[in-house]
Image (cartoon, rainbow, N blue to C red):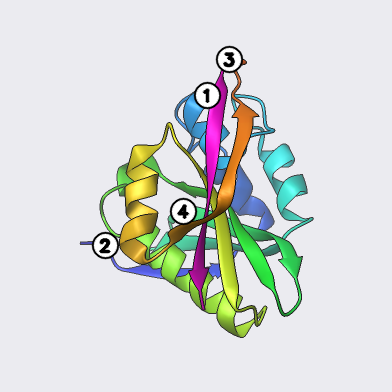
């Protein structure tokens, strides 16, 4: 099992991260407003407007995953966003390590009592993963259209910190 560490994302990470979404659907799950294939500059520009862009790396320094926060309201909540793990690190603990680090950052750096996220009904693996970590559905659903103009449902989930 690989050993992981987290650190702030750097400029040179975005080229690598932009290769993680393997399909248009995976990119939609990670970054709904982006076009496939993901451009590193688009991801970096988006991340520059968010809080705590973070990568998880193997102990050898290879980037294994990425996440950040948006919708930060001081003393209230923030949203977990742009979560993606490199294909070769899926199912190996990188996502759990990354989300645990992001939970801690939300709690200690942003000092919010609630961490929110939106997960799409067409992504059951992620829904089950977030449920396993302790996120629960809350405050309803969001009607959305995917890149094929199909209606899908975004399920808002929360974790009380």
Cα–Cα span, label 1 and label 2: 28 Å
User: 39 or 26, which is in the foreground?
Assistant: 26
> Given contact means CB atoms under 8 Å apart, are the residues at marks 1 and 4 in contact?
no
Q: Mark 3 or mark 4, which is nearer to you? A: 3
Magenta-span inclusion, residue 58: no
Mark 1 vs mark 2: give the one in front.
1
Q: Is residue 146 above or below residue 84?
A: above
Residue 16 image point, x, y percent: 53, 44
Mark 3 or mark 4: name the one nearer the start of the chain.
4
Q: Is residue 128 left or right of residue 153?
A: left
Q: Are the residues tagged 4 and 2 within 8 Å (C-beta)?
A: no
Q: Which mark is residue 148?
A: 3
Query: Which region of the structure is painted magenta?
Result: 150-161
**Which is more foreground, mark 4 or mark 2?**
4
Of the numbered discs 2 and 3, the one sitting upstream in the chain is 2
Q: Secondary structure at mark 1?
A: helix
Quadrant in which the N terminus appears: bottom left
Mark 4 Cα-neighbour bin, 10 Å: few <14, some 14–19, many ≥20: many
């Amino acid at each position: 099992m690989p050993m992981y560490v987290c650190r702030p994302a750097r400029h040179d990470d975005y080229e690598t991260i932009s290769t993680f979404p393997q399909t248009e659907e995976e990119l939609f799950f990670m970054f709904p407003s982006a076009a496939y294939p993901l451009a590193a500059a688009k991801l970096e520009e988006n991340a520059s407007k968010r809080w705590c862009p973070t990568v998880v790396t193997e102990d050898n320094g290879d980037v294994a995953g990425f996440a950040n926060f948006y919708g930060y309201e001081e003393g209230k909540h923030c949203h977990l966003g742009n979560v993606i793990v490199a294909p070769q690190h899926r199912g190996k603990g990188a996502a759990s390590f990354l989300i645990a680090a992001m939970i801690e950052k939300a709690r200690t750096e942003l000092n919010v009592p609630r961490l929110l996220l939106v997960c799409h009904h067409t992504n059951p693996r992620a829904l089950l993963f977030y449920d396993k970590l302790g996120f629960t559905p809350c405050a309803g659903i969001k009607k959305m259209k995917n890149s094929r103009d199909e209606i899908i449902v975004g399920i808002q989930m929360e974790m009380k910190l």
